[in-house]
Image (cartoon, helix red, strand yellow):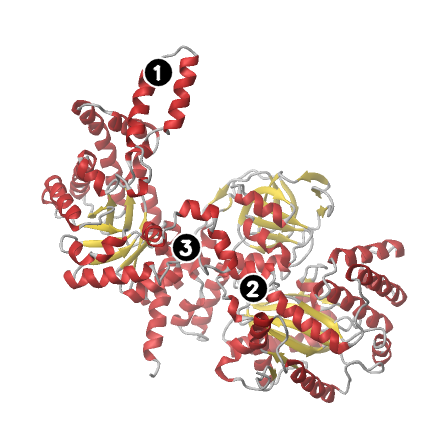
């Protein structure tokens, strides 16, 4: 195995696999070097080395020999020597996965410093303060990342020294101060790590490479991968690069920039910088940076060069770029270019603008927007008419409004969110260890950090509202509360943040629904031109139907009639119907329910005039409409204790106990209930037919489809069809079934003989095929299956293509073989999941149906599936 190649130079060409092999950071550096841009010399350790490391726990054989050979070339190119006490070479060691994971893995800067080399750095640069500033940074980063020393100990030492010296900023500490700080840091390391700080730069480098590989498997990176579906097997590359220094005085700087605004998508350079600093100061939010435009005043030559470089990179990469740079004594160096993370609104605007600029095609524009991200645009915002008590302002880091109970730790955010509470994560600044809490929280508020800090970048990627750099926020790191504008708040207090303008408000604030932008409409219009799948919505009420149509739904794929009986007077009448002990009482209850049902259908048919509406007849078992038998028994005991009558409660208990089943999911429900107690289904059929006639007379065009649930035997659907046609009369409404049982898939050909359509109920089909109760599994073991890698994806969120998907394909093939005109759709929530939609497109279904707010994302995902299929077909064999 020692003859494998693990290390690549920036000028080498690994071929088409550059991104997978060298990671996003490495591939970007290679591209910039190829364009002749100012990139510090270095090399890349491939993801293959990381994969080997994960398998064995050791750096692969031969890797360090390759690394030292590359270091020798780096020494020759720079005229400096690794470990040289007179003129030392220092390097950075950075992670770089094939998929962007900002802030999730570790970076070590200034590697190569030690007691023997720090003096040489001071002498060769003529700047002792700079040398010891770099050294204390190195000890802190190496100590925390490699030696696992708690980071707060270093921060506390810095704060203590600043208090002793009577200064506020790190930059005010002198060279002697920093020399003493180094000694304190070394003492912390010796005490906490039970070892001295390693002096040998080769040992430092070997340990740092292993630590970066370890960070790929760290909890924060693993949580990020789980959230975004990134395979663990990708691994991370490691970039080793000559250090360039932004902390060499007032002619040096470091910064992060985007070629377009990552929050709005507006054209023009957007970023921040810090004079006399290193890159971690900006991205970690340790100091609040300055707007990039101010750099023109301080470093005009470097600023102009950077603007030209940024414009060229966007044109070359044909996408908005996320750039990192350092200026060392007025000389610009580029450290990173990659496609930048952006909000959904920005993604839409950038894609549309670049298409209209001719930089990309419309098809590429459609492929550039993540379907799931469109949900960000459909969240509430602060009501402009609301009476607000604004407590403070920060930076508008990620748009959207969020209200919640304040939590001060990631663990508390997770625990409270799991308990069903809406929480707001408040931190001095976030770091990668806070990611789990950010996932759980409704939004994030930080005291420090800018628009490109960890909190801002990660929140934007998640679609979470965030306000950063809130100067009025003073968080007590050891306490349970914080000050905001001079007022004390505790964990559990309610705040609202507005990530669009940086406001922080007291209490729960009224929110309003957003309006889709012109960019939203344009991209989805282009998507509609490309897709083959029809997108419908699941809607049970007229208002839901209207909203779904506004969001582009082409019909209703699932109207669940049981939801119409679940509240108020309707529930009372439904219970009377179930409890009726003679035909007369039954007819009276149905007579009351039918006009209510008819009114609902009329409203939905009007909202969807000219578009299909699939009405599923009653699906759940009847006992779900009754009080729980245990609650009834308790009520009887309490009434008896008070001397009150219990005849009615005992009657309800008798009926409820008679209807209860050991496994109701597989019991008397759906078509089984319709066949044995047909009164409800016949009432529903009459209501559907009368509603269709009524709205048609008013000029509405109802296109109604009737769906029978839980069919497993062809004879069930055949008998139900005969029963219903007698009530539907000459309406000629299509009658089909929900395919949610494995047996229905196996005999789909026979069922198709008496069905006009199939709609796959993938929620229940997944439970049946996998033998998993969704509610129990998600509470008891599914999360651990996902965390430990037994399952890569939650099968109730993304379709299990190998199991459930195979049955869907089988049912399609058998059904269409019998009935070539059989309409096929999906009405489970998988109909809104982009990966599942791609599968349904490839399988040849006609439509998907999902909740109304997922309709825009489903439209986009369906278009992307079609475009990728066409691209594959155009490729030569």
- Give the class, few, some or many, for how many residues have Cα within 10 Å of label 2's Cα (few <14, many ≥20): many
Query: Mark 2 sits on what residue?
Result: 261
Whichever of callouts 1 and 2 sits on the residue coming sooner in the sequence is: 2
Q: Secondary structure at mark 2?
A: loop
- Determine crowd level at label 3: few under 14, some 14-19, many 20+ residues with C-alpha closer than 10 A: some
Measured in 3D between alpha carbons, the distance from the residue under mark 1 to the one under mark 2, in whole angstroms, is 68 Å
- Name the mark nearer the viewer: 1 or 3: 1
Q: Position of residue 387 (x, y in %)?
A: 56, 37
Q: x, y (%) of residue 828?
A: 33, 52
Which circle's residue, 3 or 2, is located before the other in the chain?
Answer: 2
Q: Are marks 1 and 3 in contact (CB under 8 Å)?
A: no
**Residue 567 lies in what quarter of the image?**
top left
Q: Is residue 752 left or right of residue 219?
A: left
**Crowding near pointer 1: few (<14 within 10 Å), some, many (20+)?**
some
Residue 343 in percent (x, y) is at 51, 60
Q: Nearer the viewer, residue 392 or 659?
A: 659
Disc 1 target residue: 646
Residue 276 showing in the rendered view: no
Q: Secondary structure at mark 3?
A: loop
Q: Does any portion of residue 283 appear in the rendered image?
A: yes
How many numbered circles are shown? 3
The location of residue 610, given as percent across then percent down, is: 22, 51
Residue pointed to by mark 3: 797
Q: Quadrant of the C terminus?
A: bottom left
- Locate the N terminus and report the quarter of the image it occupies: bottom right
CA separation in Å, label 1 and label 3: 46 Å
Tell me, yes or no, whether the two marked residues, 1 and 2, touch with CB atoms within 8 Å: no
Q: Is residue 457 above or below residue 716?
A: below
Q: Secondary structure at mark 1?
A: loop
Question: On the image, which quarter does residue 663 sit in?
Answer: top left
Front-most of 781 and 22?
Answer: 781
């Amino acid at each position: 195995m020692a003859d494998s190649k693990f290390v690549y130079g920036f000028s080498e060409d690994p071929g088409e696999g550059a991104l997978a092999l060298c990671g996003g950071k490495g591939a970007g550096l290679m591209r910039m070097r190829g364009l002749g841009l100012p990139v510090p010399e270095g090399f890349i350790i491939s993801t293959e080395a990381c994969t080997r490391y994960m398998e064995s726990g050791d750096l692969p054989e031969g890797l360090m020999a390759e690394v030292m050979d590359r270091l020798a070339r780096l020494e020759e190119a720079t005229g400096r020597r690794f470990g040289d006490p007179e003129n030392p070479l220092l390097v950075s060691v950075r992670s770089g996965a094939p998929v962007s994971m900002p802030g999730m893995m570790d970076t070590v800067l200034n590697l190569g410093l030690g007691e023997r080399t720090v003096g040489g750095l001071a002498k060769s640069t003529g700047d002792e303060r700079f040398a010891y500033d770099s050294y204390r940074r190195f000890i802190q980063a190496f100590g925390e990342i490699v030696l696992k020393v708690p980071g707060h100990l270093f921060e506390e030492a810095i704060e203590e020294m600043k208090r002793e010296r009577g200064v506020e900023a790190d930059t005010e500490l002198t060279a002697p101060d920093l020399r003493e700080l180094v000694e304190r840091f070394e003492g912390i390391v010796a005490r906490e790590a039970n070892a001295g700080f390693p002096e040998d730069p080769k040992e430092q480098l070997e340990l740092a490479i292993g630590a970066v590989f370890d960070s790929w498997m760290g909890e924060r990176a693993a949580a990020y991968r789980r959230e975004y579906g990134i395979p663990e097997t990708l691994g991370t590359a490691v970039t080793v690069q000559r250090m360039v220094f932004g902390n060499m005085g007032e002619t040096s700087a470091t910064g992060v920039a985007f070629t377009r605004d990552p929050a709005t998508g507006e054209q023009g350079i957007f970023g921040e910088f810090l004079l006399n600093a290193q890159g971690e100061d900006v991205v970690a939010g340790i100091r609040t940076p300055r707007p990039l435009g101010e750099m023109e005043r301080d470093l005009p030559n470097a600023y102009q060069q950077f603007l030209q470089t940024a414009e060229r990179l966007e044109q070359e990469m044909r996408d908005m770029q996320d750039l990192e740079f350092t200026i060392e004594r007025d000389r610009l160096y580029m450290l990173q270019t990659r496609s930048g993370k952006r909000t959904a609104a920005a993604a839409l605007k950038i894609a549309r603008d670049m298409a209209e600029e001719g930089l990309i095609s419309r098809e590429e524009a459609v492929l550039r927007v993540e379907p799931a991200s469109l949900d960000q645009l459909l969240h509430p915002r602060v009501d402009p008419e609301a009476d607000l008590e604004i407590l403070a302002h920060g930076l508008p880091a990620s748009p959207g409004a969020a209200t919640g109970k304040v939590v001060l730790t990631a663990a508390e955010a997770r625990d409270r969110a799991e308990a069903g509470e809406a929480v707001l994560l408040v931190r001095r600044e976030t770091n990668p260890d806070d990611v789990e809490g950010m996932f759980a929280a409704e939004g994030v508020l930080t005291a420090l950090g800018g628009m490109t800090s960890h909190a801002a970048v990660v929140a934007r990627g998640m679609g979470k509202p965030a306000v950063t750099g809130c100067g009025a926020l003073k968080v007590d790191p050891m306490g349970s509360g914080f000050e905001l504008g001079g007022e004390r708040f505790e964990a559990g207090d309610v705040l609202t943040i507005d990530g669009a303008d940086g406001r922080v408000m007291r209490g729960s604030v009224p929110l309003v629904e957003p309006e889709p932008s012109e960019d939203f409409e344009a991209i989805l219009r282009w998507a509609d031109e490309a897709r083959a799948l029809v997108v419908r919505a699941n809607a049970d009420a007229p208002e839901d139907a209207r909203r779904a149509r506004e969001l582009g739904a082409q019909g209703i794929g699932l109207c669940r009639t049981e939801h119409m009986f679940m509240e108020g007077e309707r529930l009372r009448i439904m219970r009377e119907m179930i409890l009726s002990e003679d035909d007369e009482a039954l007819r009276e209850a149905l007579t009351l329910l039918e006009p209510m049902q008819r009114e609902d259908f009329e409203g939905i048919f009007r909202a969807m005039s000219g578009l299909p509406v699939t009405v599923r007849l009653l699906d759940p078992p009847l006992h779900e409409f009754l009080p729980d038998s245990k609650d009834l028994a308790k009520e009887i005991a309490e009434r008896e204790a008070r001397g009150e009558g219990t005849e009615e409660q005992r009657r309800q208990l008798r009926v409820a106990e008679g209807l209860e089943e050991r496994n109701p999911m597989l019991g008397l429900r759906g078509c089984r209930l319709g066949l044995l107690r047909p009164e409800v289904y016949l009432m529903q059929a009459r209501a559907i037919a009368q509603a269709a006639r009524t709205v048609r007379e008013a000029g509405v065009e109802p296109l109604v489809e009737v769906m029978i649930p839980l069919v497993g035997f062809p004879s069930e659907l055949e008998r139900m069809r005969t029963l219903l046609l007698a009530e539907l009369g000459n309406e000629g409404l299509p009658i089909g079934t929900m395919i949610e049982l494995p047996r229905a898939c196996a005999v789909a050909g026979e069922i198709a003989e008496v069905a006009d359509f199939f709609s796959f109920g993938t929620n229940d089909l997944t439970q049946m095929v996998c033998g998993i109760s969704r509610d129990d599994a998600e509470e008891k073991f599914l999360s651990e299956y996902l965390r430990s890698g037994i399952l890569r994806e939650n099968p109730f969120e993304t379709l299990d293509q190998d199991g459930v998907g195979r049955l869907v394909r089988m049912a399609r093939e058998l059904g269409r073989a019998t009935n070539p005109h059989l309409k096929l759709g999906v009405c489970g929530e998988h109909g809104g999941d982009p990966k599942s939609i791609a599968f349904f497109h490839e399988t040849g279904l006609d439509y998907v149906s999902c909740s109304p707010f997922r309709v825009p994302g489903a439209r986009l995902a369906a278009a992307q599936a079609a475009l990728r299929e066409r691209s594959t077909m155009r490729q030569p064999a």
